[in-house]
Amino acid sequence: MLFSLLCKPKSLDHEKAKGKVVVCLRGETGRMDKGYQAALVGAAGMILCNDKASGNEIIADPHVLPAAQITYTDGLAVFAYINSTEYALPPLLFFFPY
């Protein structure tokens, strides 16, 4: 699960991501590479959530798909929302390995 949460290469499921906004956690791999990995599997966009170490730092990056970076606190709210519903709106997807 951690690999897909971090949007590492070959960790995202095309069937689950196609046409959706993918939520990635910042860390371990480059910010722009996370968007590239999402684009490779057909995602419509990406929300990059800061990890605790990144806190409130927001960096403007030239992503290959529509993307937004949010703070750690806002990311906690996004993950709480995703985990509270089966069908998040807009079509957000948190990757589970099974």
Image (cartoon, rainbow, N blue to C red):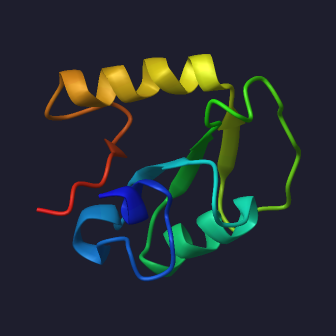
Pick whichever, 80 or 90, lies toward us.
80
x and y percent of residue 41 in the render? 42, 77
- The answer to which quarter of the image holds residue 14 is bottom left
For the residue pair 96 and 47, the one nearer the viewer reads as 96
Which residue is at 39% across, 29% downward? 79
Drawn side of residue 97 relative to residue 8, left or right: left
Q: Is residue 12 above or below residue 74?
A: below
Quadrant of image for the C terminus: bottom left
**Figure check: 53 above or below 17:** above
Q: Is residue 51 above or below residue 39?
A: above
In the visual, does 45 lie left or right of 16? right
Give the residue displayed 50% in from the left and 71% down from the top: 8
- Tell me residue 2's x, y (percent): 38, 57
Please tell me how many numbered marks the rendered image carries: 0
| Quarter placement of the N terminus | bottom left
Q: Is residue 89 left or right of residue 84?
A: right
> Residue at point 33% right, 30% down?
89
Which residue is depicted at the point 43% across and 73% down?
Answer: 42
| Furthest residue toward front | 53
The percent coordinates of residue 90 (x first, y second) are 38, 35
> Where is residue 91, by image quadrant?
top left
Q: Tell me where residue 16 appears, x and y as whole percent.
A: 25, 64
